[in-house]
Amino acid sequence: MDLTRFLQELSESSGVSGREEETTVVIEKFFTSGPGKGWITDFRRDRLGNLILRKKGEGGEEAPKIMFAAHQDEIGLIVTEIKEGFLRFSTVGGIDQRVLPGQEVLIHAREEVPGIIGATPPHLQTPDEHEQAIKIEDLVIDTGLSREKAEELISVGDFVSIDRRLISLKNSAVSGKALDDRAGVAVLLQIAEELQKLKHQADVYLVATVQEEVGLRGALTSAYGIIPDLGIAIDVTHGKMPGLSDEDAYELGKGPVVVIGPQVHPKLFTSLQRVAEEKGVKYQVEPSTRPGGTDAFALQIARAGVATALLSIPLRYMHTSVETVFLSDLREAGRLLAEFVVTVDGEFVEGLSCF
Amino acid sequence: MKELIKKLTDITSPSGNEDLIREAIREEIKEYCDDLKIDRLGNLIAFKHGGGAKIQFAAHMDEIGVIVTYIDDQGFLRFSNVGGLSPFQLLGQRVRFTDGTLGVFGLEKLEQMKDWTLNKMYIDIGATSKEEAEEKVAVGEFGGIIQDFADLGRRVAAKSMDNRVGCAVLIEALKRVQSPRNDLYCTFTVQEEVGLRGAKTSAFAIEPDLGIAVDVTLTGDTPEAEKMAVGLGKGVAIKVKDQSLIAHRRVKELLVRLAKEKKIPYQLEVLTRGGTDSGAIHLTRAGVPSGVISIPTRYVHSPSELIDLEDVEAAVQLVVAVMETPCDPENL
Amino acid sequence: MLLKELSELNGISGREEEVREYLRARIKGKVDKFHTDSLGNLIAVKGQGRPGPKVMLTAHMDEVGLMVLGIDPSGLLKIGAVGGIDPRVLVSKPVLIGRERVPGVIGAKPIHLQEKAERKKAIPLKGLYVDIGAKDREDAGKVVKVGDPVAFATQAGLFGEGLFKGKALDDRVGCAVLVELMQMETDFPLYFVFTVQEELGLRGARVAAYGIDPDLCLTIEGTFAGDLPEAKGHQVSTRLGRGPAITVMDRSIIVQKKLVDSLVAAGKAQNIPYQLRELTVGGTDAGAVSLTREGVPSAVVSVPCRYIHSPVSILSLADYHHTVQLVKAFLEGGYFLERVD
């Protein structure tokens, strides 16, 4: 498959937490009429909107169930007040207010309405103003519409996403919005592709979860419904850049990051490492003391508990609209996880409960 | 309606101590449901048969309050908060413990205002020694702030309007509903103010197809209020988002459609802080599509929470409309 | 569309070549002749040698932007501002570097790793980098050089009801107005001057005016509009949709009263809406021209724009058309002739 093209479709689709449908449709189309046709056994959406894609293995009724989770939602904004043709707003998820001035957005109203978050020109600012970040209360979305038209089209509670095309940079780098975690969703597609070439016992559930950015909500309910034997979350981690210390960040282009921490089952961690070494996948290791930030944390405590691992893609400028990743890291992540699937059988699953 | 709200708000039932309020609600609704039960955590669940989808309505019956943590030699009580309680709301107020004992709040001498925390406050129950105090109150006892119900005409103010007004809406809806077209589980939940606890366990047991909480929300229509589009007297509020929940799109759309059809005044609500029972319900088991019907309320978590009765009426009508609209559980 | 094409060209002050080349091709055949001077101003004229006063119209080609100052070992580009730019608008925006238009993005430290106090602070320019996806300094050096100009990558287009959005509307809208005015026939010599380096201190206009030695100058600008809800009335300055803004005074010029009056009279006579620019901050080419040689009577007519000096600004197309009409009415009506001496 053309990874850049599908990452672009994923990144440019709008799926603010709680309103992920447009992104869901992109993924569904990939498997129903796109290159992924025939790659999976079936799929369904659950009640909260999680998209659950299933590829059956050769293990029959007793086959182990592996769940891969990557969240399809993105951070965004929500309209709180309509003032003439301007909108006040609040945030959905941890958006950094400092990225907003001068940003173009799309308001998902009765129809899609473009908007601009304006910025005061420097001529009119006092010198100390320059040093302070602009507060979200002081920002408005300019729709360029009259009051009547704005009120006809837009209502309080409409969701707003960032308007941004995916940009190809040098090497295999791409930059855009929502790559946290559409990059992970792209890895799900990558796993499905790799599995075409491989034989495996386990039934594989590729889940594009919802509402991760507002509290890992979709992962919790989808895992409850699937009842997996083991779960692996695919998310992003911080890429190296000036101003970040080495312990906080990982190299782009040097392979996916295997995480070790309280949210990760030690045997899954070592299995991923072993598979990576056997199959020649370059990888990095991230020790995680703050386990709460990804779907892995929710997966782990579904029902009677799920053995969980976390694989991360290094990404620069997280939660801005120019999140940047290397495609090579996505491809390698897909290959590693597909090869890992091959190694899972009933005995392996049993071993996960033996500490 | 006014009388019912007065009756419910006069009762003291802080989180974990919902016996009095539960009994009062049970008396009100026992004639109006097919089955009534109290679960292990103390949630009161009224069932009414109607076919269709299993809908859980949830209104929490607990209120914020205090818990006694220490009694000093002079007989003063130190206390901690139960739920979100601001120290600034307490001075000059009175507390009633669940057994009826009364007390007043006091404040230590402070060097500066910013030192004013709950730790600097105490409760005086008129005791002159530790022993005398202990005859009336023990460590671990719960109390609630008391305040007379204020009838302001179309608007009324009382303590624990959060969420006795929600309870009143649900009670009134149960009384009014003529032909329910869904299986209704009207749940009067416990311990919402300390973390949506009653809603979480009741939803697990009920396994509803659809969850709707009835609770209060803030308004942005007072002088220099935090910006918010909800106003008192402008109708029932249909929630889009708060910190605990993004309302399921179809549930929100259902509520909006019914409000429009029945010409019920409504407004859309985006609450930037706070959460409600639906936050817990929607994450139950494999997920429950959920929404919230809110009653706009000023001065929430103060001893004088103020509402508009027309908004309450709109809320009742909307709840009844949901009850009487057949919902397809497979198509939510 | 003229305005869209002009907006999407890159022309940081001192590096206006894309804009100049475009305009040169565009005005060929519409004027008697044109030339460029040693700073890079593009000067066109109609009716040279005719009797009557020499009238000069100016609009500046340059825009505020960034320049590559260096490449750090990891391949990220260090940047500096060219012109008045608020570093707070740079975060999280795509940019294009140099004539080759190499794409890049301006990233920021993720919110997760910021201290609470840090979040409230603006990120200074020194803490911002352009990322082009290079592996290291050498890799970046293959496509980018120190000194390359960096411009916002913003698509221009229609917006809202009757509005237009794009970058650099200050002052590509002025350039567009000048191009449209080239259809006019006048019985006096009319100079169209597309200036450079306005944003760095009105530098191009100064030398162009010296060379032309005009009797009258009219500068066409894109000016600040602050018509947002809850804006304090005295800080709004101009409002979208109320017509071209006539300057009485800014930091660079106090316009002669009779010129202001003439512009107002032209608007009234032709029923063209206009507004007076209320704020006195900012300066324009007219300021430099007015102080050239023995002094040149100069005026400013502006198209109101929201959010100038940021990646995306907005103007009203009606204001744009009315600006063309007002200047035309002013010139054709000869309102200034009896007054200029």
Image: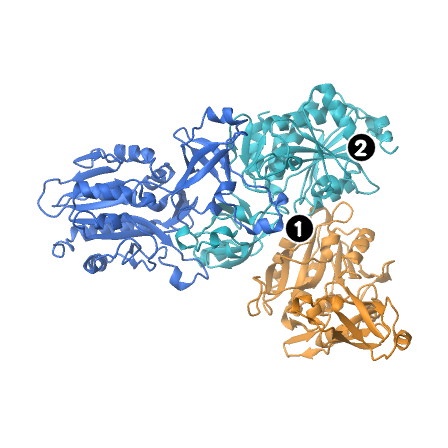
Q: Which residue is mark 1?
A: B248
Q: Is residue B192 visible?
A: yes
Q: Which chain is cyan?
A: A
**Residue type of the residue flagged with mark 1:** His
Q: According to the rendering, which colour does chain B have?
A: orange
Above or below, comparing residue A246 to residue C186 in the picture: above
| Distance between the alpha carbons at the discs numbered 1 and 2 | 37 Å
Regarding mark 2 in the picture, which secondary structure is present there? helix
Q: Amino acid at mark 2?
A: Pro
To which residue does mark 2 refer?
Answer: A266
Q: Label 2 neighbourhood size at 10 Å, few (<14), some (14-19), many (20+)?
A: some
Mark 1 or 2, closer to the camera = 2
Q: Along the line of sight, which residue is nearer the eye, C215 or B181? A: C215
Residue at image point 60% right, 30% down: A252
User: Where does residue B156 sit, x and y in percent of width and height?
Assistant: 66, 75
> Do the residues indicated by labels 1 and 2 lie within the same chain of the protein?
no
Q: Residues within 10 Å of mark 1 (few under 14, many from 20)?
A: many
- Where C280 sits versus B19, above or below? above
- At mark 1, the secondary structure is loop
